[in-house]
Each structure stands twice: as C-alpha cells, then as structure tokens.
Amino acid sequence: MNKNTIKKAVMTTLALSLMLQPIISEVKANAAAVTQPAVTATQNEKYNVTLHKLISEKDIELKNTGKELKDLQGAVPYNKAKYGEISFNVYKLTKPASGYKEESPQAVADIVEKLGTTKPSKHSKKRNVKEEYGVQEVSSQVVDENGNVKFELEKGDYVIIEKSNSNTKQKAKPMFISLPMTNTEGKGFEKDIHLYPKNKVQAISFTLKKVQSEKGKTDNPLTNSPLEGATFNLYKGERGKGIKVGGDLKTNSEGKITVNDLEVGEYYFVETASANNKLISKYCLNDDNNGLGFGVTKEGDVRILRKDINDTRSIALIQLTDGGQKYNNIPLVNYEKPELKKQIVGAVAGKTLSYDAGEVIPFELTTYIPNDIKDYDHFKLSDTPNKSLKVDTKSIKVKLAKKEGEYVDLDEEELTVGKDYTLTTEGLTNGKAFEIALKLSPELAGKFAGRDVVVQYNASIDESVDLNATLSNNAGIDYDNGTHPKENPGEGGDGDKDNHVDVDSYGKRFVKKDAGLWGTTLLGEGGLKDAHFRLEKENKGNWEIVERFKDVVSKEDGSFEIKGLKEGKYRLVETKAPEGFRLPDGDDAITEFTLDANSKDANNAAVNIKNSKDTPLPVTGLDAMGYTVVATVGLLGVAVVTKKKKEVNA
C-alpha cells in the first residue's frame, strides 16, 4: 500500500468519524421537540409520563414541551362521565431507531397505530410493522375523572395510542416519545413529563322518531306518516325508576325529538300525551315495561337497551347522529283510538227519526279494531237504552267487515258467540241491555286487527212511553290497551266512550166535555166519561185506522190520551157518544191534528172535544110553560150578569 492510498484511507476514516458524531436528536411527541443531553441516562431509570386528556369544540394547536401548560386555549379536561371511558395504550419499539423507515417521529407513530399493534396473517401482503419495529405493548390505562393518566416508563422509544374513541368527533393523534427527554436548559433529563393529547368533541345526542298507524295500511315505521305534537319526558336510570331530565319534549313535523349533551348511563323516554286522536302504547309508560330505553356506554356509544334477545319492547325506530338506524316494530307507532259509531240502519245522518210503539228499530254499532289489538287487555261494546226502549237481545248479530276497505259490508263474515266473543244480557249494571266482549287470543286478535266490527240488533218503543219523548240509546266502548286508562287518565285509552242515537215518540192528550145548554157552555164543561173514539192516520191521501187506538174510551173525568206514535197527520173519529149525549154529525165528529217536532208541548196541554146533550122530546101545556119560564129566567140571569160586567168595565 503506497502513501497516497494510506493517506486517502486516513482522510476517509476521519471524515466518517466526524459525520457520525452524535448530534442533538429532535424527537417529537405530538409536536414536542426532544433533545438528548450530554449526560447519560441509566437503562433502568424511570420517567413519569402524565397524559392530560383535553377536549375542545374547535380546532386548537397546543405545543407539547414536556412541561405543564397554563394556557389551554379554551380546551377543558376530558369528562369521562359525560363522554365515555377512554384508555391509552403504550407500545415500546424494541428495534433500533436506525431501522425506522418513516421520515418523522409522527409518521412512525401513525404507522404503528395503523399496522404495528397486530401481526398480519400469514398470507397478508401488509407490512409486518410489529416485527419491523419490535412493537411490544407495555401498559394500558383508563383516564381518571379529570381526564389524566400516568405511566412510569424506562429509557426507550414509545408510541402512545388512544384506544377508545368514545363519542368524540376525532380522537387524539398517536404520539411518539423518546425517553429520556432533555429539560429546557439542555443540562439534564425531565423526570416528570406532561403531554396533552386533545380531541375535538361532538356532544352525544339521540333522536327519537314517532309515527302513526293509518287505517287501511300496514304498519311500518319506515313508511308510516310522522306524528307531530306527541309529548315525551326523558328519564335517566332504570326503566320505571328513573329521574326526569329536563322538561316536556314534543315531536316536530317530522315526528322527531332530539336530546343532546347526554352523559354515560341508561335513559328512557316516557310518552305523556299523544296527538291526532292516537293512543299511547303500553310500551311508552313510566314502568318496567317501557320499551323506549337506550344507553350511553362508557365508550361513548349509544345502544338500545334490551333485557334479552327476545325483548320486543325496544325502540321501533331510532336515528343516531351519524344517520344510523335500527328498527323493531312496536313502541314508536301510535295506534288509533277506538271509537264507536252508532246509527239506525237507513237513517239520514243528522235527522232524528220517530217510531210507533212496538215498531222494529234496526240499530247498528260499528268500531274499527286497531292494529295493536293483541296488546289489549279487553275490548267491549255495550248498549244502554232509555227505559222505554226495549232491546231484542235475540236479534243481536256481530259481523266482521272486509279488511281491505273502510266501509262495512254486511254480507261479510258473521262471528260466533262463545267462539269469537261473549254476550252478556243479564246481571249488568247502569241499565245496560247487553255487553259484547271480543276474545283476544293471538289468533283472534290477528283476525280482528285492522277491520271493522259491526253489531246489529233490533229495539222497539214500549207502549208505556211518555206522551212526548226523545229517547236516547247510548252505545259504549270499554277498552284497555295496557295503559289502564281509568287508572291513568291522559296516558292512554279513554276507558268508556259513549255514542248515542235519539228516537222520538209523539202523543196527545184530550178531554171529552159537555158542550152546555144549546152549545153555550151554560150548565156544561164537565168531563164526560165513556165517549168512544178511533184514531186514524193519513197515508198517501187515505185514512187508515191505527190498530192500537181503534177504540179509545174517555175516563171518569173525560180525559184520554194517545201516545207512542211516529210523526204524521192524524184524526180522531168519535164513534159513540156518552150516555145522554148526541153523537156529532159529519165533520163535527172528527178532530184532526199533526204530530211532529213542532207539535210538542212541554205542558202536554189537552185538546177539548165537546158533546151536546140529546134533543128533548116535545112538551105541551103547563110543562111547556114551566120549561119556558126556567129558560127565560136563566137567560135573564145571563143578561143581568153581562150588564153588570159591562158597567164595571165602563
């Protein structure tokens, strides 16, 4: 080897030696500059690394220096009670730093988080970062109530990764830290290091959607129209035992309610008032059966609460803030409130009909059976007629209308008493004539749901009816959809809800009287008994005898009445005069009158019908003179009385 070669080798060695001198390494821990001091740290020396977890609603930049920071730029310590539990995992990189392929400490941290915590499968084409960098998990801890967590670490390179995302909008970036870290004076190492991972948070919220069942349509939370105006309260805690949070909440035009700033724990909604004539479901009450429960987990996730996999009470439709949806089918649909329509078959709506006593009145009750009938404890229909209305219980028929339409088809399926329903006609209270209770086995409930039930029966007016009467016939519907409406007013069904139809019955009172001397009422006006009449009714221009009143006889005081009649034009024909009185001739024997709503008299004033005495036989001589004197004296008496009245009035 010549001198030049030796000289070049020496120079090259010297240059390499200078190039490989230790330089101050800049190691960043999430933007924290780390400089190695001239002093040497021992391998087993421990360093306290405290993470101060922060949250902020806006983007901020905090420079990690290893020192405690005074100005947090509006960020606040993480509240795990509100946002959920999070943890940090510490991974040590056991391979030499010279083997890191990434260009910066942050790039190393990112690739370790993405690929370095697990080993790829045998046939995977992914990088084996875990092997390349010798990634080993050395510690994992959950932040405390103040968002802090403390690690005791030895000399080496580490990546710290936030493992639980909670419900924050973004989690903290992974951090690369090389220990020991030099102090700010560059003369030693920091024994206590403070780092500030931060998250941009989004408050935990929950959206509830309420929809309504629609007659003639299949219930589907996805397609049913929203229910606006339903009122809810939010409770925190175990279902039925929770504490109310905030005030009343009402669904908007989309049927939605959104609650914000939720903390970790269990919640449930309680519906306090429905809308649009819909009922509250038994799954929406403040009890253990409530199906509107959800929870915020310690990880900050929102979960529907179920007691077990078969718990069908869970929320029918929820929408989380990320747009995710979960569906069941029960609690969030509000179903129709059972209502009853009562009518007389063939009657014109709004018009009160009148009937003759004994005439058949065909009544009909119709009610729509809601789709949630399977949840009902009972469903009953009843009839409470006026005491003068007599129901023919043997005429009762119960039918089921077509499911496809809303109109009753009377030729549809007739239900069977004892099999499909029970019929009670005796031992009822409050004047009920009958009570029908649908049988609600699962099979029958499915058969009834979404269909009209029609009850048909006949009644008639009793002959003992009052003279002029409006008779009310009340139909009743008694149900319990599980909300026990009579015990919990305002939280469900109405209990008994009546619907009624009125019928009119007409009549008139008469008095048969003595017409008096020569029809002047002189010595007359007394009631006459045993006058006979027959009643006739006009029918298309002809007069027909009313069979019930073909022979009406005046009483001792001359009074008599006819009643239990429908409206129309009538006439009384006198057929036999009282003893000693003359039967009127022609039209004088007929009294015409009209019975209708305008003829009603609250006092039921009587109409007077007068009869004259028979004409006396001819008389002669002194008898005639006597009669004449008596008559003359009588007339003079009348004249004197009349004159005195005129003088008094003059």
Image: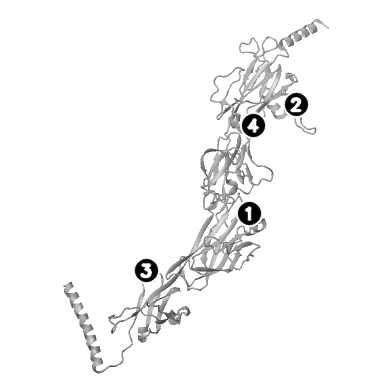
* Dot label at residue 374: 1
Q: Is residue 448 above or below residue 70?
A: below
Q: Residue furthest right?
A: 1
The residue at which mark 4 appears reads as 165
Quadrant in which the N terminus appears: top right
Q: CA distance from mark 4 to mark 3?
A: 86 Å
Foreground mark, 2 or 4?
Answer: 4
Could you tell me if the residues under marks 2 and 3 are in contact, i.e. CB atoms within 8 Å? no
Q: CA distance from mark 1 to mark 4?
A: 43 Å
The residue at which mark 3 appears reads as 603
10 Å crowding of disc 4: few (<14), some (14-19), many (20+): some
Q: CA distance from mark 2 to mark 4?
A: 22 Å
Sequence order check, earlier mark of 1 and 2: 2
Could you tell me if the residues under marks 1 and 3 are in contact, i.e. CB atoms within 8 Å? no
Quadrant in which the C terminus appears: bottom left
Q: Could you say where residue 406 lies in the image, as x and y percent from the top left?
A: 57, 61
Mark 2 lies on a secondary structure that is helix
Foreground mark, 1 or 4?
Answer: 1
Horizontal side, residue 599 vs residue 344: left or right: left
Horizontal side, residue 67 vs residue 117: left or right: left
Foreground mark, 1 or 3?
Answer: 3
Sequence order check, earlier mark of 4 and 3: 4
Q: Could you say where residue 375 lies in the image, as x and y percent from the top left?
A: 62, 52
Q: Is residue 314 above or below residue 499?
A: above
Horizontal side, residue 250 vs residue 110: left or right: left
* Dot label at residue 130: 2
Q: Could you say where residue 346 lies in the image, as x and y percent from the top left?
A: 51, 70
